[in-house]
Amino acid sequence: MLEKINRSAQFILKETSSVPEVGIILGTGLGGLVREIEITHILEYQDIPNFPISTVEGHRGKLIFGNLSGKKVIAMQGRFHFYEGYNMQEVTFPVRVMKRLGIKTLIVSNASGGVNPDFEIGDLMIINDHINLIPNPLIGKNNPEFGPRFPDMSNAYDKKLIEKAEAIAKKNKIKVQKGIYTAVTGPTLETPSEYKYFRIIGSDAVGMSTVPEIIVAHQMEITCFAISIITDLGVPGKIVKVTQTDVLNVAEKSEPLMTLIIKELIAEL
């Protein structure tokens, strides 16, 4: 895998001459942050050696390079999921490439279903911990260049960045929640009994992404921050039929608030 990572990174460096400080992964329907980036280069995933191709509506499949809040950034406009048929090493491959390019901080966003009864549709939730119910991306032979065989995950979501994000939200009068994100395989949305189970085991929100990327980034000593937009509710009495269009519509409405927080957070790095 190391050879593939190096080949991808060398191609990107040749095309862009970019050495980014911050990596950004934009979730379902959350590509609008790109409009805030002073773009210097755009690469299509399909043109990058060894890169997977995003197959999901709401994921554009572009790697964006530029400046945001005074920092050099690389943004994934579209991510990869286990349910698309990719293995976990493929899902997390771009994170390893971004590390090779030089990022020190990774910011991840997603759309998720809320199981905390105090949440409302459209809420922003800063992730402060996770429960992983999909295969771990570190299963298999470990390359010491990636990091330790048994990385500690007690501070996967950087506490200082969480505090900064909360202060930014308070200053801008943006309502934010904090909570535990549970990662599942998908692609089916959850049954009422599954939602109940996730709440029992300590979840505040559930989704099909983010955790694999965070695990790999943390192994490589990248500082991580993640935020969810609650696009539907898995709470008894509030469960309704949800479509991908519904998810995209809610994400689009709440995205400007998420974007503001991310922009100001990057400025304070």
Image (spheres, grey):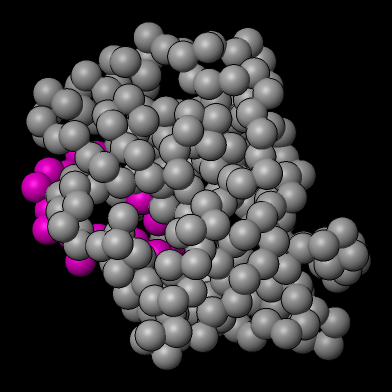
Q: Which residues are magenta?
A: 24-44
- Across and down, in percent, residue 75 comes to 30, 49
Relative horizontal placement of residue 97, taking residue 93 as reference (left or right): left
**What residue is rendered at 63% in x and 11% in y?**
141
Q: What is the quadrant of the C terminus in the image? A: bottom left
Horizontal placement of 215 versus 27: left or right?
right
Q: Quadrant of residue 207?
A: bottom right
Q: Residue at x 53, y 11 (%)?
A: 143
Name which residue lies at 53% across and 37% down.
Answer: 218
User: Is residue 224 covered in magenta?
Assistant: no
Q: Position of residue 66 (x, y in %)?
A: 15, 50
Against 46, residue 80 (above or below) is: below
Q: Is residue 79 visible?
A: no
Q: Nearer the viewer, residue 162 or 75?
A: 162
Asked which quadrant contains residue 223, the reply is top left
153 on left or right of 61: right
